[in-house]
Amino acid sequence: MSDPLLSWRPRFPILNTCTYLVSHSLGAMPADAADELQQFADTWATRGVRAWHEGWWEMGAETADLLAPVIGVPKGTLTMHQNVSVAQSVLASSFDFTGARNRIVLQDLDFPTNHYVFEGFRRYGAEVVYVPSDDSVRAPLERLIDAIDERTLLVPISYVLFRSAAIQDVKPVIEKAHKVGARVILDLYQAAGTIPLDVGGLGADFAVGGSVKWLCGGPGAGYMYVRQDLIPEMAPAMAGWAGHSRPFAFETGPSDRAPGIERFQSGTPNVPVYYMARAGYRIVNEVGVPAIREKSLRLTRIMMDAAREHGWRLNTPERDEERGGSVVIDMPDSERVANALIASGVIVDHRPNAGIRLAPHFYNSEAEVRDAMARLAELAAR
């Protein structure tokens, strides 16, 4: 079958050396990223401090605007940060937890950093509530919705669960939160770049994510979305000089925050990462997330069919509309099998209480996916 998405394959050097099925953890590096980093180095070497006023200072906003259509938000509502932990902390620092509305409602299947960040706000008066799940695949949303009440201030929720790749129906969560006056933070890390998103249309208050995975932007390029009407009223306590309305005036005392999304900025921008990340963003925009999603469903279905054929346990939702870009397969001695598969040149990863996580992306071929599953069967039988 002809696969037009494979025309982008030569732009990812690592694909010449192995079968790369770990884009849920670290997307393959585009060759353009090296060119972008060289451009940064050349600019630093030849322009020095002048580079700040010749494009560096605006690069964070320009990079965020490249990402905006991928997640379905207007330009000017995204800002770049080091990672999700920083972005979540900046958002949480915008709220007062000393009143009767002080609850942060979380799911037990969230990525651990979300627990760690919000646990830290207990010292400021937050009450952190965890909604339990029955297994490692799905988090029961009805329990989460029931836990959101007039005491709830924030509801951070993963659009796709990291351990199982289960897509969560966040719309009713947002509706319940808004009904009682709470705010919702969507974690898009395992969704952006592999699932079509319309964060603006969902009415989400905030969203966070990073570029390490399906966006192929590398580490250090986290991002934060703030709903446009909320931007002027937000005043994060965790702020730095880059969030000032006149940063180069170097005014001391309280910050006169920038009027737009830049008010959420912290310190000196991470310029080399912006160069690097925009290479992946451009390619994802060129390929188009709908096309990426169609291929992802086709390739993950091949993996799931193979798992069922061999009697392996699937820790991933069966239905396409409930599954993100990964397949999680468990079997006896799965960690050993995963390590042997990696040693054979098929790059995957393993998570405790989940199994082997495999994640084909638009640059993978059907042939290599089938070969990977054959190798997996051979190694599991040993």
Image (tube, grey):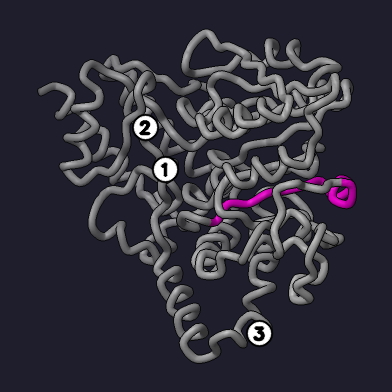
Whole-number angstrom distance, CA of label 1 to CA of label 3: 34 Å
Q: Nearer the viewer, residue 125 or 257?
A: 125
Q: Residue at x 53, y 34 (%)?
A: 113
Q: Are marks 1 and 2 in contact (CB under 8 Å)?
A: yes
Q: Which residues are magenta?
A: 221-233
Name the residue carrying label 1.
25
Instruction: Locate residue 66 relative to residue 154 in the image: left or right.
Output: left
Name the residue carrying label 2.
357
Q: Is residue 195 above or below residue 270?
A: above
Q: Nearer the viewer, residue 178 or 66?
A: 178
- Earlier residue among tags 1 and 2: 1
What crowding class fits label 3: few (fewer than 14 Cα within 10 Å), some (14-19), or many (20 or more)? few
Q: Residue at x 80, y 41 (%)?
A: 201
Q: Hey, what amino acid is under mark 1?
A: Ser
Q: Hey, what amino acid is under mark 2?
A: Arg
Q: Can residue 322 be found in the magenta stretch?
A: no
Instruction: Indicate the position of residue 303 as horizontal and vertical percent values.
Output: 36, 31
What crowding class fits label 1: few (fewer than 14 Cα within 10 Å), some (14-19), or many (20 or more)? some
What crowding class fits label 2: few (fewer than 14 Cα within 10 Å), some (14-19), or many (20 or more)? many
Query: Which residue appears farthest toward the front when viewing the image?
Result: 253
- Earlier residue among tags 3 and 2: 3
Q: Nearer the viewer, residue 381 or 46?
A: 46
